[in-house]
Amino acid sequence: MFFFPFCYFFLFPFQHKEIRLTVPENSHLTRMETGDALQRTLLLHLCVASLSFHLCRSSTLQLPIGIHPLDEKYYTSSELINCKDGSKKFTRDRLNDDFCDCLDGTDEPGTAACPHGKFYCRNMGNTPKFLFSSQVNDRICDCCDGSDENDGAIGCPNTCVMGGDFAYETRSHVSRDDLVRKVGTEDPVQKVKGLKILVVLQVLIILIVVGIPLLCRRSRSRRRHSH
């Protein structure tokens, strides 16, 4: 936190100055002063970027995991939170403590403690969705942002911006492999069936080619004997 007041007091006298990268011919600004001005400009940008990151990170850490954005005020507006079914109340420090206080799972949106709970995947950059509480921390990456596996047992990569859901991609990859194996095993069978049909056709053609002349000869010989 000390870094940000330091940035302000150190750079405030310089932030309203016009800094040019090209030095005019009639300017008395030396190369050393130009370099010093550029360093201060870079440091100012670094301070702004660091402050933005710090604010974003702080706001993210304050939000309970597994809840829908529309429920954020419900969980953060008071230290005492009501179960949504009206059965009881619980303090905020018991939120996501891996112990089920509310039968409907209101107090455990980010764990698997309550059987009737629902986990909300934010999936920034992709499609949000709800999971059953049994899918939370089950060693399977169901959310493309990996938020459903938050106990540190496994690390789920964030695949939201790469086309989505890690579990879906895994299932698709497995199904493609199964399809390839299935096609690979069916292809020889189809070839054998095709060969059998070809052999039968060849035999029929041979019988027709050979049999018809024989029948003709027999019919002629019978006619001769009859005359």
Image (cartoon, rainbow, N blue to C red):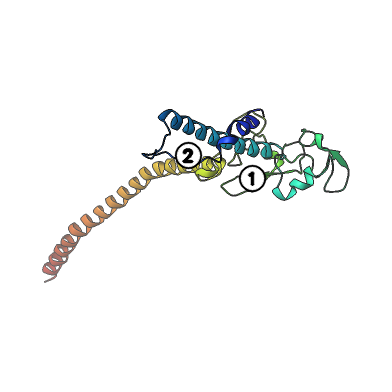
Q: Nearer the viewer, residue 58 or 200?
A: 58
Q: Quadrant of residue 206?
A: bottom left
Q: Is residue 199 left or right of residue 165?
A: left
Q: Nearer the viewer, residue 23 or 86?
A: 23
Label of residue 21 in the image? none
Q: Quadrant of the C terminus?
A: bottom left
Element type where label 2 sits in the image: loop
Q: Nearer the viewer, residue 112 or 164?
A: 164
Label 1: how many Cα within 10 Å (few below 14, some 14–19, many 20+): many
Q: Is residue 89 left or right of residue 224?
A: right
> What residue is pinned by disc 2?
19
Which residue is outermost to the right?
88
Which residue is outermost to the bottom?
227
- Could you tell me if residue 198 is visible in this image? yes
Element type where label 1 sits in the image: loop
Q: Which of label 1 and label 2 is nearer to you?
A: 2
Q: Amino acid at mark 2?
A: Ile
Q: Is residue 188 above or below residue 214?
A: above
Tell me the residue at 11%/68% (across/down).
Answer: 224
Q: Return the x and y of residue 6 as percentages of the image width and height.
A: 63, 29
Q: Quadrant of the N terminus?
A: top right
Q: Return the x and y of residue 193 as percentages of the image width and height.
A: 35, 48
The tag earlier along the polypeptide, 1 or 2, is 2
Q: Nearer the viewer, residue 172 or 78?
A: 78
> What residue is pinned by disc 1?
122
Tell me the residue at 58%/35% (across/down).
Answer: 13
Label 2: how many Cα within 10 Å (few below 14, some 14–19, many 20+): few
Q: Return the x and y of residue 79 as percentages of the image width and height.
A: 84, 39
Q: Return the x and y of residue 118 as percentages of the image width and height.
A: 72, 44
Q: Amino acid at mark 1?
A: Arg
